[in-house]
Amino acid sequence: MKEQLEQLLADAIGQIKADGVLPADQTVNIQLDRPRDKSHGDFATNLALMLAKPAKTNPRQLAETIVAAIPQNTLLAKTDIAGPGFINFTIAQDQLKQQLEAMMTSDRLGVEPAQDKRTIVIDYSSPNLAKEMHVGHLRSAIIGDAVSRVSEFLGHTVIRQNHVGDWGTQFGMLLAYMEALDNQEAEYELSNLETFYKAAKQRFDESPEFAERARELVVKLQSGDEYCLKLWNQFIDVSLSHCQEVYDRLGVKLTRADVMAESAYNDRLPGVIEHLKEKNLLVEDQGAQCVFLDEFKGKEGDPLPIIVQKKGGGYLYATTDLAAIQYRQQELGGDYLMYFVDARQALHFEQIFTLARKAGFIEGDIRTQHYGFGTVMGKDGKPYKSRDGGVTKLADLLDEAERRALSLLQQKSSDLTESQQQEIAKVVGISSVKYSDLSKNRTSDYIFDWDLMLTFEGNTAPYLLYAFTRVNSIFSRLGETGFDQTADFILDDPREVALANQLVRFNEVVHQVYDKAMPHFLCGYLFELAGRFSSFYEACPILNQDNEALRNSRLKLARLTANTLSEGLDLLGIPTLEKM
């Protein structure tokens, strides 16, 4: 519908150019939005305000000219002009009904597949395997997962890549500590990676002999020593198992098969250096191999170095990232590389993407994009910490979420059994943590607040999960009698029209989530949909409606609402519940 309206406006602009109102070479970017005052139409545009200057006329007069030039059509019921020249459009009800029918008969709820289908390689989660996953790993995992789900739903080929950190100096320290323990003791201590890491770090700091042994083991590991690789593989296996447990609890679609660790690129790194040398991009600076790009300069105006090889011959993140780009394009066939990594890495990725193109690691129409995100903050305005002031392990955070959700359910009077409450608490607790994050603008920091995320009021997971069960309960009460799903839609009540208008926006919103990598667009849509259904439900009787035609129409609206809530939550990685 939005596309149809855009075409009508394009035709109108073409006409007023032909009439000489606008210069023939004037570029026009047609922008449609939802009007702030929802009593004024379904779409609005400020075209007249933007084009008044080149047209050498006042905005309101130009708005009238644009409206007059819109071709005859069956799409619009009404067009009016507000304020200094905003144009508001009201979609004809027949068009609205046609879209509802298309949603009703579609297994995709009318969501159109992407026209420009791509092979998208999505880099997300990517924890450091030296430690257990903590709260700082939450955002990458769930935002990346939601965008990957939406991308797949739109028909793109999605290849997930979990670029875990499993190499480097710190692993020598961990191997030395494993070596110092007997097998049984090592196995016990590895069950808690955080404790294991702290103990190894303490030994490293306190014992020069241990520190020297750790450095020896790093060199041996990186040279492929069989003994070191055996210890290393044992540690990595335990750490990846911890990660997979967290992914499974979060409902994140990452598996062991998606892991492409830093170490996997080791054999490629000398080739990266050689390639940069062949392209005459390498400069030796204090013994290190660097690339200096004119696009990136420091405060004094000097180019910033991208160090790709240290003085001693070691490689860095930049080297591995260049190898990963080459692999993802050439071997995985990716033509769109998405990176969901902390916003603080923005400069790093700008440099890497620029260098990759200059060096020829990226060829042709390949899109690369870093989608940064803000930090999870505590109520004190600082990065979220545990009660003892340490970094909160993600597994502990999810345990706490489930405990709090169970307590919340136990306070509500219901006919749920104890086992049902426990199962529902798992869904509600973890969904609350996920939704609280996903409903915030990706680029912003947000405050982690248990009380706000677990309330049944406002834009929260409990509210939406309960809204779904409420809609779904209508069909449980309906029983086997069913309803006529081929009946016509009747939209006489304003609440019916408002609900219908919200339902048909689903296609538009899903595409917006993909275009901007912003899951909070979908969260906001679902929250508004639940609210509009609530208003409709309170004002428009359904099951006790005597008019059969009206009853069938309202049941169809309810069914579409349930299906849309379910599909929308699934795209966010949140399961629905039959009852709460």
Image (spheres, rainbow, N blue to C red):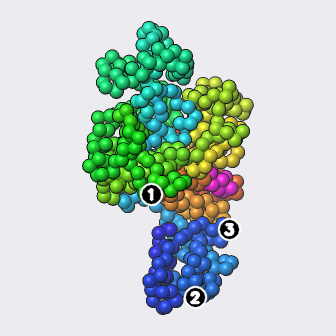
Residue 464 is at least partly visible in this image:
no
Q: CA separation, marks 1 and 2?
A: 39 Å
Q: Could you tell whether 31 is left or right of 385 in the image? A: left
Asked which secondary structure carries label 1, the reply is strand
Q: Residues within 10 Å of mark 3 (few under 14, many from 20)?
A: few
Kindly identify which residue carries mark 3.
37
Q: Is residue 535 magenta?
A: yes
- Which residue is located at x 32 percent, y 38 percent? 269
In the image, residue 70 sits, relative to residue 298, either above or below, namely: below
Kindly identify which residue carries mark 1.
295
Q: CA separation, marks 3 and 2?
A: 29 Å
Overall secondary structure of the magenta section: helix
What is the magenta range? 526-537
Q: Nearer the viewer, residue 174 or 114?
A: 174
Q: Is residue 420 magenta?
A: no
Q: Position of residue 72 (x, y in %)?
A: 49, 83
Q: Position of residue 112 (x, y in %)?
A: 43, 59
Asked which secondary structure carries label 2, the reply is loop
Q: If you read the primary sequence from the N terminus, does the residue marked by circle 1 or circle 2 appear first? A: 2
Q: Residues within 10 Å of mark 2 (few under 14, many from 20)?
A: few
